[in-house]
Image (cartoon, rainbow, N blue to C red):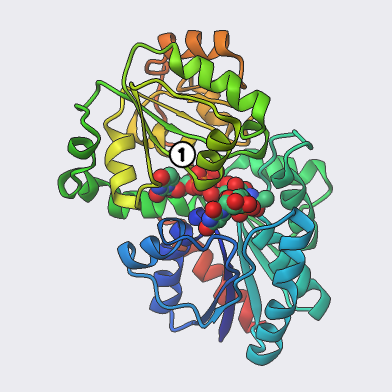
Amino acid sequence: MRVLSVVGNRPQFIKSGPLSAALAARAVDEVVVHTGQHYDPELSQVFFDELGLGEPAYRLEAGSGSHAEQTARMLPGLEGALLAEEPGCVLVYGDTNSTLAGALVAVKLGVPIAHVEAGLRSFDRTMPEEWNRILVDRVSTLLLCPTEVAVRNLAAEGITEGVHVVGDVMLDANVRLATHARERSAALERAGVEPGRYLLLTLHREANVRPDALARIARALNALAEPVVFPAHPRTAAALAYGGIELGPHVRVLPPAGYLDFAALASQARAVLTDSGGVQKEAYWYGVPCVTLRTSTEWVETVETGWNRLTGDDPARIAEAVAQAGPGESHPPLYGDGHASDRIADLLCTMTRQ
Ligand code: UD1
Ligand code: UDP
């Protein structure tokens, strides 16, 4: 039984860890293709090293570019891998261009697709990720949803077959690794901050690295009275430099962190500021309030429970949300029980046997 997994971005490496282990435990032959969308060691190799991921069988080196160019560069290599490996299904994660490329090639070759994180919608169609979600869900055979909200989103688009609620594989990784991170990481000392007395920031969305939006966010950050630890995505670091946008000395700009250092920083922050999808959930799991620098989120439960505030890039809203950031009214378990990978692996076994 063979599954071909497509990964290419930081969060996909993280999500693939627990699922690869669950597949191996069931003697499923997993062939991993790394599209090369993320290639800098701190966005890619560090996760293979830290999380003990196996060496991908294929490395496509698609690299950066416009959405169409980047996606297109992945297609021939993916097609070659599928033709050579003849998998029973293709596994894709999330909502990136690598996810779309994997699904496109699989559908063209008539190979069933299993989509991890199916059914998520921000309902903001200006986001490139929203189209990737819609298109990939439309052609998937197995739709692996983290929540009932995701199931309802799919039903609203007429997709009801092959839909399963499995929980969130990112929680599986979190449960396994995050508790050790606090003990093992010296990231707080290195950043010169104390537990509960700093903010943690991540920023990489296309809309937020445009010069005008980035300047507004920088204005908001410069007005904050607390230390801000900012492991910066290279895209954002480049946009800050290109725009000549200065951040105050209380904003400590660092290279992107590894998973364990990031977990240590996120779990001990007073609050997290982010435009990431995954980081919103992780903040919730840590019981750390979150301020999301977007006007929409696909992780609506974090907002509904009062732990997450949406601000967009408006400095006044950011200031208010940071000042008010505190625990929500309740903290129900969200996004599963840490065993999503086992459920997904079981479903894949059923699918590839048919
Ligand atoms: C991509 C995903 C986004 C996901 C994120 C995870 C899409 C459309 N976007 O965004 O959904 O949340 O990954 O982190 O698929 N760059 C480097 N080194 C690298 C990779 C990128 O310097 O290793 C720089 C390049 O200048 C590149 C820019 O970052 O043009 C953007 O990279 P890209 O992969 O296109 O998008 P992300 O912002 O990383
Ligand atoms: N992350 C990390 N180092 C960082 C920033 C984020 O390890 O410097 C991890 C974070 O813990 C989470 C994942 O990367 O598990 C989120 O990925 P990202 O924000 O790049 O993408 P998104 O979730 O928005 O697609």
Q: Position of residue 200 (x, y in %)?
A: 37, 30
Q: Is residue 126 above or below residue 50?
A: above
Taking the spot 53% from the left edge, 64% from the top edge, the residue there is 344
| 186 sits left or right of 277 in the view | left
Where residue 187 sits, quadrant-wise, is top left
Q: Is residue 128 above or below residue 222?
A: below
Q: Nearer the viewer, residue 24 or 201?
A: 201
Element type at mark 1: helix
Quadrant containing the N terminus is bottom right
Count of picture labels: 1
Q: Nearer the viewer, residue 252 or 349?
A: 252
Where residue 89 sits, quadrant-wise, is bottom right
Mark 1 Cα within 10 Å, few/some/many (few <14, many 20+)? many
Where residue 53 sits, quadrant-wise, is bottom left
Q: Position of residue 77 (x, y in %)?
A: 68, 79
Ligand 2 is within 8 Å of the C-beta of the residue at disc 1:
yes
Q: Position of residue 276 (x, y in %)?
A: 53, 39
Q: Position of residue 239 (x, y in %)?
A: 58, 38
Is residue 95 visible to the viewer in this orientation of the structure? no
Taking the spot 43% from the left edge, 9% from the top edge, the residue there is 324
Quadrant containing the C terminus is bottom right
Taking the spot 72% from the left edge, 66% from the top edge, the residue there is 101
Q: Is residue 24 above or below residue 201?
A: below
Is residue 192 visible to the viewer in this orientation of the structure? yes
What amino acid type is highlighted by mark number 1?
Val
| 1 sits left or right of 114 in the view | left
Residue bearing the label numbered 1: 279
| 292 sits left or right of 81 in the view | left
